[in-house]
Image (cartoon, grey):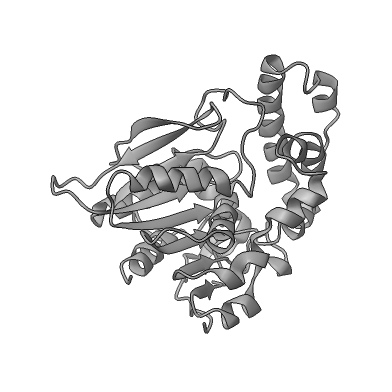
């Protein structure tokens, strides 16, 4: 499919990728959305919490969007809440997923989440289908976008899934890791490491025989954490094995539902390999938009609705 032309032109300061990335995380407030939590019990004895929101009108809808957050996110992050609100205002029900160990409560099992947990997404999709929706669309951000793309290309999605939109996606996980390790991203990297280590210490208290405090404290980088925990807890040999097997880029050729990828050119988390230009050209179902601006999950516009939210609803309503 030919590359999608972008019309995104932000206000002056938001042309800076770092400003665009940081501003919504620190200063954006999303009001006017009410979420109701549902706990989904999983076959392995663990759970996933879904935060539902609905259109304000009382008329029942048969279409729902499943939203998946990014690394160390949750269903209350501004980018999830903002899109959920806009979808609700356009007559979509929304199921905002909190990946394992991301809903404010330590999960029951040693495993948690990673960039390739399509088994969990598959269970969520089946659960939502049981609620008798005719049309399901998937929306993923960053790590959640990688999960979404991998799921669509790796598995044969049920007929109810009709479309998807993903934003700021590290389609090549190792390429993204190398980019995050650069000095320009030092502050972001340290925030991720701090958050992940806090969760690992919480997990260590519950599973003291599987991970030690000293091993956690010795982690100085994201790849250290992925070598120590993410890979081992989820059945991979090491971090490189995890990145190689879970990167969504290799699955894009097999996606069979209309899917839009929005990756800003000034996203400081994405290296060249994270822009799947050739894959988009060769797959009629894959649309790639690479705005010049937007940062990582930024895309600010004046008013309450961000550019990626406009584009998501516009794209989903086509199918």
Query: Residue at image x 77%, y 42%?
Result: 222
Query: Residue at image x 51%, y 47%?
Result: 121
Number of marks present in the image shown:
0
Horizontal and vertical percent position of residue 281: 58, 82
Query: Residue at image x 62%, y 34%?
Result: 112
239 displayed left or right of 25: right
Image height of 306 relative to 222, above or below: below
In the image, farthest residue toward the left = 58
Observer able to see residue 15? yes
**The image quarter in which residue 187 lies:** top right
Image height of 169 relative to 318, above or below: above
Horizontal and vertical percent position of residue 28: 44, 45
Closest to the observer: 9 or 13?
9
User: Is the C terminus in the top left, top right, bottom left or bottom right quadrant?
Assistant: bottom left
Closest to the observer: 300 or 282?
282
**The image quarter in which residue 78 lies:** top left
Closest to the observer: 284 or 126?
126
Horizontal and vertical percent position of residue 288: 54, 73
Image height of 186 relative to 282, above or below: above
128 displayed left or right of 24: left
Horizontal and vertical percent position of residue 236: 77, 44
Closest to the observer: 202 or 268?
202
Observer able to see residue 28? no
Query: Residue at image x 55%, y 58%?
Result: 155
């Amino acid at each position: 499919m030919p590359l999608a032309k972008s019309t995104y032109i932000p206000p002056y300061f938001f042309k800076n990728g770092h400003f665009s990335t940081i501003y919504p995380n620190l200063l954006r407030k999303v009001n006017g959305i009410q979420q109701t939590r549902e706990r989904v019990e999983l076959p392995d004895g663990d759970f996933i919490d879904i935060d539902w929101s609905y259109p304000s009108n009382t008329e029942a809808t048969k279409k729902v969007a499943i939203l998946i957050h990014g690394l160390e996110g949750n269903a209350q992050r501004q980018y999830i809440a903002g899109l959920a609100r806009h979808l609700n205002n356009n007559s979509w029900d929304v199921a905002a997923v909190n990946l394992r160990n991301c809903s404010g409560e330590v999960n029951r099992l040693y495993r948690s989440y990673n960039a390739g947990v399509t088994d969990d997404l598959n269970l969520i999709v089946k659960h939502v289908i049981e609620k008798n929706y005719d049309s399901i669309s998937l929306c993923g951000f960053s790590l959640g976008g990688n999960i979404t793309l991998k799921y669509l290309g790796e598995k044969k999605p049920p007929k109810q899934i009709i479309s998807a939109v993903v934003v700021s996606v590290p389609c090549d996980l190792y390429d993204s890791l190398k980019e995050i390790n650069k000095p320009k991203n030092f502050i972001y990297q340290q925030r991720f490491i701090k958050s992940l280590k806090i969760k690992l210490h919480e997990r260590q208290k519950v599973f003291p025989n599987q991970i030690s405090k000293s091993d956690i404290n010795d982690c100085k980088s994201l790849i250290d954490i992925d070598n120590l925990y993410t890979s081992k807890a989820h059945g991979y040999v090491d971090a490189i094995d995890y990145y190689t097997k879970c990167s969504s880029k290799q699955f894009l050729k097999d996606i069979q539902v209309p899917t839009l990828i929005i990756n800003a050119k000034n996203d400081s988390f994405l290296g060249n390999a994270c822009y799947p230009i050739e894959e988009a050209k060769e797959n009629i179902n894959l649309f790639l938009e690479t705005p010049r601006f937007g940062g990582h999950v930024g895309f600010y516009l004046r008013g309450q609705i961000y550019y990626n939210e406009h584009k998501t609803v516009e794209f989903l309503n086509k199918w």
